[in-house]
Image: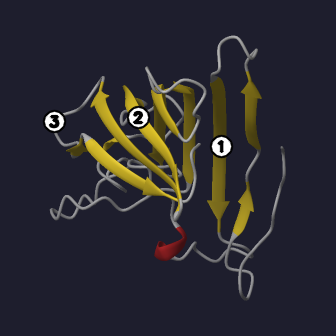
């Protein structure tokens, strides 16, 4: 699924976001499901106006790069606070294989999974391969289609953590399985 949007109140943001979001069901004999997702997002102000700080992109956490704390990946404020300030560019890619719980027979309401995530955020001056670099993680997940909706627990291991990265190995998600 590819799309390009121009959004914003009073012309404050332009966003071009090509997105590939695919999921494939494997043959019945495997009872598994593989999914992959890739997203590249770019934002900038319209008409020479700067992009408001609250429109910047962040990565890390559920929905981007599991194993890293939510919003913890990307440029750091150089004024001494060491806060993550977000960026105008973001790339995130995920791949996951979900399979039935061992001993659960054909019950697909509980599934185990294995995943690999990658992502980064950068500003206007950096490049895709800049100093902040891509972050990678891998891990296991437990997905449950509960009466309240889909729930997922993930245990992740960052693969190339930098000294200033904040990690969060156990994460929880409601509302979507991939």
**Residue 67 against residue 86 in the figure, above or below:** above
Nearest-to-viewer mark from 1 and 2: 2
* Residue behind mark 2: 141
Q: Front-most of 36 and 32? A: 32
Q: Front-most of 11 and 37? A: 37
Distance Cα–Cα, label 3 vs label 1: 26 Å
Distance Cα–Cα, label 3 vs label 2: 26 Å
The colour mode here is secondary structure
Relative placement, left or right, of 140 versus 42 is: left
Residue at (65%, 71%) from the top-left corner?
45
> Percent x, y for residue 91?
57, 41
Relative placement, left or right, of 139 versus 177 is: left
Most extreme residue toward the bottom is: 10
Distance Cα–Cα, label 1 vs label 2: 24 Å
Nearest-to-viewer mark from 3 and 2: 2
> Percent x, y for residue 74?
38, 48
Q: Secondary structure at mark 1?
A: strand
Residue at (19%, 58%) from the top-left corner?
82
Q: Secondary structure at mark 2?
A: strand
**Residue 125 seen in this snapshot:** no
Badge 1 or badge 2: first in the primary sequence: 1
Q: Front-most of 100 and 137? A: 100
* Quarter location, residue 13: bottom right
Q: Count residues near mark 1 (Cα–Cα under 10 Å), then give few for <14, some for 14-19, many for 20+.
A: some
Badge 3 or badge 2: first in the primary sequence: 2
Most extreme residue toward the top is: 29
The mark found on residue 163 in the picture is 3
* Residue behind mark 1: 40
Say whether marks 1 and 2 touch (CB < 8 Å). Answer: no
The mark found on residue 166 in the picture is none
Q: Count residues near mark 2 (Cα–Cα under 10 Å), then give few for <14, some for 14-19, many for 20+.
A: many
């Amino acid at each position: 699924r590819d799309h390009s949007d121009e959004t914003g109140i009073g012309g404050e943001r332009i966003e071009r976001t090509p997105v590939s979001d695919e999921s494939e069901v494997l043959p019945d004999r495997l009872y598994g499901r593989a999914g992959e997702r890739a997203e590249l997002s770019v934002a900038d102000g319209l008409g020479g106006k700067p992009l408001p700080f609250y429109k910047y992109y962040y990565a890390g956490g559920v929905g981007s790069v599991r194993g890293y704390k939510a919003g913890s990946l990307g440029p750091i404020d150089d004024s001494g606070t060491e806060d993550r300030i977000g960026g105008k560019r973001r790339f995130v890619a995920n791949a996951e294989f979900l399979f039935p719980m061992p001993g659960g027979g054909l019950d697909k309401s509980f599934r185990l999974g294995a995943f690999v995530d990658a992502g980064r955020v950068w500003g206007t001056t950096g490049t895709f391969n800049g100093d902040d670099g891509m972050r990678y993680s891998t891990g296991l997940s437990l997905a449950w289609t509960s009466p309240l909706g889909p729930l997922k627990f993930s245990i992740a291991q960052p693969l190339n953590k930098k000294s200033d990265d904040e990690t969060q190995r156990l994460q929880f998600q409601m509302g979507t399985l991939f």
